[in-house]
């Protein structure tokens, strides 16, 4: 028969598992940080957008616009 000592298996975990866990944790942490930053800066971004829209409505950039289209194809 087998003894209990002969049934014990030894295994090791290489550094790859720790590096994988750490990199996935850091990626999740970075995503959460960017989400928080995006939520906190949303009112400022909307205010800047509204200011730009008001400025565009008050003063036009150009009074007239000419669009010239060039094509190298044969008219026939």
Image (cartoon, grey):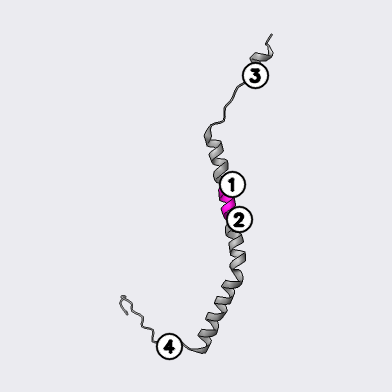
Q: Between tags 3 and 2, which lies in front?
A: 2
Q: Secondary structure at mark 4?
A: loop
Give the vertical position of 53 relative to 41 (above or below): below
In the foreground, 58 or 63: 58
Mark 1 surroundings: few (<14), some (14-19) or many (≥20) residues within 10 A: few
Q: Nearer the viewer, residue 64 or 17?
A: 17
Residue tagged by mark 3?
8
- Disc 3 crowd rating (10 Å Cα; few below 14, some 14-19, many 20+) is few
Point 41% across, 87% down: residue = 65
* First of labels 4, 1 by sequence position: 1
- Percent x, y for residue 61? 44, 86
Residue 31 colored in magenta in the image:
yes
Q: Which residue is the site of mark 2? A: 32
Q: Does label 3 or label 2 sit earlier along the sequence?
A: 3
Bounds of the magenta segment:
26-32
Q: Nearer the viewer, mark 4 or mark 3?
A: 3
């Amino acid at each position: 028969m087998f003894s209990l000592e002969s049934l014990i298996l030894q295994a090791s975990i290489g550094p790859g598992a720790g590096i994988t866990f750490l990199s996935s944790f850091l990626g999740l942490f970075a995503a959460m940080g960017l989400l928080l930053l995006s939520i906190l800066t949303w009112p400022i971004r909307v205010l800047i957008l509204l200011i730009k829209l008001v400025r565009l409505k008050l003063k036009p950039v150009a009074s007239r616009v000419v669009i010239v289209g060039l094509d190298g194809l044969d008219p026939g």
